[in-house]
Amino acid sequence: MRRTLIAGSLVAVCVAILATDYAVANRHPFATRPAAEQKRVTAARLARKSRDGAVAWVLIAAAAAFLAFAKGLVKPEKPRAPGGQGRQAKAPGPLRSAAAPEMDLSFVDQVVAQIGRGKEAAIPLLGAIQKHYRYLPDEALRRVCELTEITPAEIAGTSSFYGQFRRSPVGEHIVRVCHGTACHVSGARQITEELRRYLTIPEGEDTDAARMFTLDEVACLGCCSLAPVLMVDGHTAGKLTPATACDALKVTA
């Protein structure tokens, strides 16, 4: 703070000297003065010019020092904690991942012992695992590869080829909307979009945050005469509109 004041004062003094010299130099017309006076004025002007040159350099240096010192006085505003008034936000600590509960894989051991360990057992094993866990958990699939002759590549290929297998958890209720030809031309897409809004399913997902409903698009439900049609936990509803499709979910209540 003190250095800033000194530099600022020096700037003010230099500016005052230069302004005074300029005013003195232009106070009286030079041509109207006597010859002796003109020589004295000329000598004085040369002296002022030399002095003003030095003062100008001092002014530049003082101004630079003032700006540097003044910049140091300006402190960046400290971040505030969200929702707080004037409280400094604390730096986040290291991220800690919550340990996921260990999955009980005893069922996998049992079903492998019952069905078999050969490559031909892949589809029956995946079907049994999905029926038990309601999807194909990665831990269960790794366990299958450890206990059988089935490779991870074969597991991945089989589980992705057949549409009935799921690799992500499903909701408590499965909603299947038919998107076959008859249902498609009758407004199946509009029904699906309305159900997504009604169930607040995020974009790119098929299950709501609470994992109550999973919305699936299927090729056919075998009810073309009822198009557009959906099925909720085995209950079929047809001749739907976007508004009545949401009412069809009430059978789960």
Image (cartoon, rainbow, N blue to C red):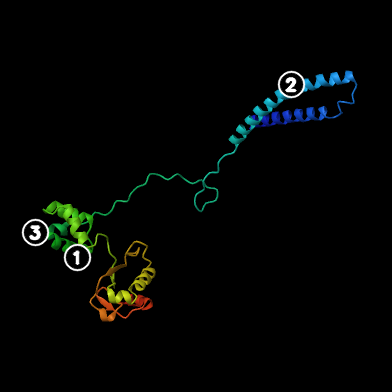
| Residue in the foreground of this view, choosing between 101 and 243 | 243
Kind of residue sitting beneath label 1: Lys
- Residue annotated with mark 1: 131
In the picture, the disc for residue 18 is: none
**Where is 180 relative to 44, above or below?**
below
**Where is 56 relative to 125, above or below?**
above
Quarter of the figure that contains the C terminus: bottom left
How much space separates mark 3 and mark 2, taking CA atoms? 105 Å
**In the rendered image, which quarter is residue 211 located in?**
bottom left
- Residue annotated with mark 3: 116
Q: Label 2 neighbourhood size at 10 Å, few (<14), some (14-19), many (20+)?
A: few
- Disc 1 is placed on an element classified as helix
| Position of residue 165 measured from the top left corner of the image (x, y, whole percent) | 21, 63
Tell me: 170 left or right of 78. Answer: left
| Residue in the foreground of this view, choosing between 191 and 202 | 191
Residue placed at 13% from the left, 54% from the top? Answer: 150
Q: Is residue 97 visible?
A: yes
How much space separates mark 1 and mark 3, taking CA atoms? 17 Å
How much space separates mark 2 and mark 1, taking CA atoms? 99 Å
Residue placed at 63% from the left, 30% from the top? Answer: 64
- Disc 2 is placed on an element classified as helix
**In the rendered image, which quarter is residue 236 located in?**
bottom left
- Residue annotated with mark 2: 50
